[in-house]
Image (cartoon, rainbow, N blue to C red):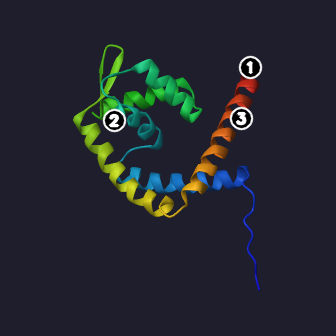
Amino acid sequence: MTTTTTPPANARMLGLAHYAARAVLESVLTRHDLAFQQQIALRPLALATGPVERDRLTADTVAALKVDVDSVRSTIDELIAAGLVATDASEVRITDAGRALYERITKETSAASARIWGDIPEEDLLAAGRVLTLVAERADAELAAVAG
């Protein structure tokens, strides 16, 4: 009789899960001619109830992706040039075209997410959420110490 044991979570396992899930997302984004970083910057605008300070969007995207400010500013400019985001002084907002694209992408990725996550027991998701939150906090602290 063969017994399969579940290995404990580690950085490699986390990375493999991340890249597998990101590949699913990127396959959808590619069909819509949108880059990963563009989608990450577009999402908070789609969820906002009004315009967002451009500097706040930039800072939040830098913090989420751990990328440089200039890269995020370029990404926001790309979204504006594509007509997905509009700007007014220091604020940015999603356009109707941006909202429609975001909704199409969300619909497609939601179906994949349901297949990936759908039958995982709630208690497992809660445990994984606690662990991933702790790992992210510790990694952020490590990055701050190295940059410090």
Residue drawn 34% across the image and 35% down it: 46
Question: Which three-letter amino acid code belongs to the residue tagged 3?
Answer: Arg
The image quadrant where one finds the N terminus is bottom right
User: In terms of sequence position, does the residue under pointer 2 or pointer 1 come before the other?
Assistant: 2
Q: Secondary structure at mark 3?
A: helix
| Residue situated furthest left in the rendering | 96
- Is residue 137 shown above or below 12? above
- What residue would you read off at disc 2? 46
Q: State left or right for residue 121 relative to residue 86.
A: right
Where's residue 104, x and y in %? 30, 50
Residue drawn 70% across the image and 35% down it: 139
- What residue would you read off at disc 1? 148
Q: CA distance from mark 2 to mark 1?
A: 34 Å
- Is residue 89 shown above or below 87? above
Count neighbours of disc 3 (C-alpha within 10 A) and say few if under 14, some if 14 to 19, many if 20 or more.
few
Question: Which three-letter amino acid code belongs to the residue tagged 2?
Answer: Ala
The image quadrant where one finds the C terminus is top right
- What residue would you read off at disc 3? 138
**In the image shown, does 24 or 10 lie closer to the viewer?**
10
Q: Secondary structure at mark 2?
A: helix
CB-based contact (under 8 Å), mark 2 and mark 1: no
Q: State left or right for residue 141 relative to residue 30.
A: right
Q: Nearer the viewer, mark 1 or mark 3?
A: 3
Question: Which three-letter amino acid code belongs to the residue tagged 1?
Answer: Gly
Q: CA distance from mark 1 to mark 3?
A: 15 Å
